């Protein structure tokens, strides 16, 4: 035994976690002022024992709250049986998750086609899979070009970043993957004008989350679906942030009575365990054949056990309807407030569009009051509380935001 290594290992328990984060981690997330060490429901607690009402949920990840007993029990039980197995072999859990996702995606669809799922570990990875699947689908006809929207966000891996319509995130990493065109959001005619003989797909979010919780205009997504049908294009819907009940439907596209050809899901799927899914209509999914794409950890039984338990619990609490009802409560709390121009988004994904460019300051003051919210740009606060949040907690969070705005006057 190497005693010096053991001594160093043990010494880490005595180091301040924020200091260790600053010295040992790359600083791509900026300076971290709080170290969270545990959670319970909509609450999280830092290393100094301070409590915070979490209205970000790890960026729409902890949709069932923190340390949910049913999720913890499912993961613990699976960990005692089998944590990981290569995708060379099947496992008992992943296919059940895939079957449930297929059922939820197709709910309300008059077509009722069957679909198939590929598992990875994150939203960026399943968006990469969607890009690769679309290109493989179009390979025989020489089509590879994908149209996305300005303001969109699809991830930080090179393919997903190339699809993202935000220059500030792309510029440091050029040259990007070729074959993408970004057009104005909420303009179906701009999409049509960008179509070439090489175009294979249009890739959109049902609500632009990272872009500022920006809603689609009435009829926009329906028009894009019709356009894709008319021009023989795939319609890819990035539901990484909006999926699984958050917007008041199981998936954001379901508010618009359409069915995409490819749907990507992550964030809330594993309640914090790393898992993402790329669903595609069966005829599209068939473009992937053995060896085309893969993921070492994708769909492994430990993460899939969290996903299966998450889906079951979301069904039991009727997550979409709960999100819809509680989202209306957020709207009512801010009615008539001159500091808030409008509340965008749907369900429990909300954007507070502020009258002043003080989003960062409001988030900092709110944190000091025990509330976690997320500033996007200069004048938008994103709210994404757990779907198990109570009405009283929503009222408290809205009061703290109003207090924080008042402190800046």
Image: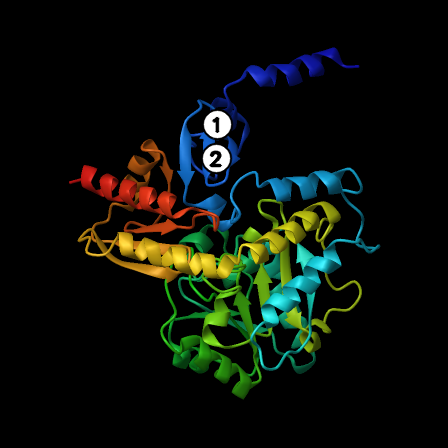
- Relative to 93, 309 lies left or right: left
Q: Does residue 369 lie above or below 104 as drawn?
A: above
Camera-nearest residue between 346 and 13: 346
Give the Cα distance between marks 2 and 1.
7 Å
Camera-nearest residue between 92 and 146: 92
Q: SS class of the residue under badge 2?
A: loop
Count of residue discs: 2
Q: For mark 2, what is the residue? A: 27
Q: Does residue 269 lie above or below 255 as drawn?
A: above
Q: Earlier in the sequence, mark 2 or mark 1?
A: 1
Residue 142, x across and y down, in percent: 64, 79
Q: Does residue 349 lie above or below 135 as drawn?
A: above
Q: SS class of the residue under badge 1?
A: helix
Residue at the image point whose x is 33% and y is 53% from the top: 330
Check contact, mark 2 vs mark 1: CB within 8 A. yes
Residue 287, x across and y down, in percent: 72, 73
Q: Does residue 292 lie above or below 256 as drawn?
A: above
- Relative to 317, 326 lies left or right: left
Binning the other alpha carbons within 10 Å of mark 1 as few (below 14), some (14 to 19) or many (20 upward) gives few
Quadrant in which residue 179 is drawn: bottom right
Camera-nearest residue between 196 and 6: 6
* Whether residue 140 is visible: yes
Looking at the image, which residue sits at the far left?
A: 409
Residue 63, x across and y down, in percent: 51, 49
Looking at the image, which residue sits at the far bottom?
A: 230
* Labelled disc at residue 254: none
State the quadrant of the C terminus.
Answer: top left
- Relative to 84, 15 lies left or right: left
Q: For mark 1, what is the residue? A: 22
Residue 29, x across and y down, in percent: 46, 39
User: Which colour assignment does the render follow?
Assistant: rainbow
- Relative to 10, 246 lies left or right: left
């Amino acid at each position: 035994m190497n005693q010096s290594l053991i001594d160093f290992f043990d010494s880490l328990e005595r180091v301040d976690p924020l200091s260790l984060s600053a010295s040992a981690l790359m600083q791509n997330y900026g300076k971290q002022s709080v170290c969270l060490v545990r959670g319970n429901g909509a609450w999280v607690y830092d290393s100094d024992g301070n409590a915070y009402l979490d209205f970000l949920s790890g960026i729409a990840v902890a949709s069932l709250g923190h340390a949910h007993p049913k999720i913890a029990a499912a993961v613990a039980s699976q960990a005692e049986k089998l944590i990981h197995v290569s995708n060379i072999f099947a496992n008992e859990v992943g296919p059940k998750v895939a079957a449930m996702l297929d059922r939820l995606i197709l709910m309300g669809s008059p077509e009722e086609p069957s679909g198939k799922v590929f598992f990875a570990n994150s939203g960026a990875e399943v968006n990469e899979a969607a890009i690769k699947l679309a290109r493989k689908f179009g390979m025989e006809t020489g089509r590879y070009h994908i149209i996305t929207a300005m303001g969109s966000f699809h991830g930080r891996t090179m393919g997903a970043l190339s699809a993202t319509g935000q220059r500030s995130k792309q510029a440091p990493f050029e040259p990007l993957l070729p074959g993408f065109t970004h057009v104005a959001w909420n303009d179906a005619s701009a999409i049509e004008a960008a179509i070439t003989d090489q175009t294979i797909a249009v890739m959109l979010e049902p609500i632009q989350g990272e872009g500022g919780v920006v809603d689609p205009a009435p009829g926009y997504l329906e028009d894009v679906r019709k356009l894709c049908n008319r021009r023989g294009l795939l319609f890819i819907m990035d539901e990484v942030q909006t999926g699984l009940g958050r917007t008041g439907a199981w998936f954001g596209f379901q508010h618009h009575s359409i069915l995409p050809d490819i749907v990507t899901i992550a964030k809330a799927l594993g309640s914090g365990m790393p898992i993402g899914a790329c669903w595609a209509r069966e005829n599209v999914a068939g473009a992937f054949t053995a060896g085309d794409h893969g993921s070492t950890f994708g769909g492994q039984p430990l993460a899939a056990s969290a996903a299966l338990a998450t889906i079951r619990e979301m069904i039991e609490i009727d997550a979409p309807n709960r999100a819809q009802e509680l989202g209306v409560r957020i709207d009512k709390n801010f009615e008539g407030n001159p500091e808030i121009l409008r509340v965008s988004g749907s369900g429990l994904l909300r954007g507070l569009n502020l009258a002043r460019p003080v989003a960062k300051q409001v988030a900092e003051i709110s944190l000091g009051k025990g509330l976690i919210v997320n500033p996007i740009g200069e004048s938008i606060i994103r709210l994404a509380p757990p779907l198990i949040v109570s009405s009283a907690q929503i009222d408290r969070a809205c009061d703290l935001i109003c207090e924080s705005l008042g402190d800046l006057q």
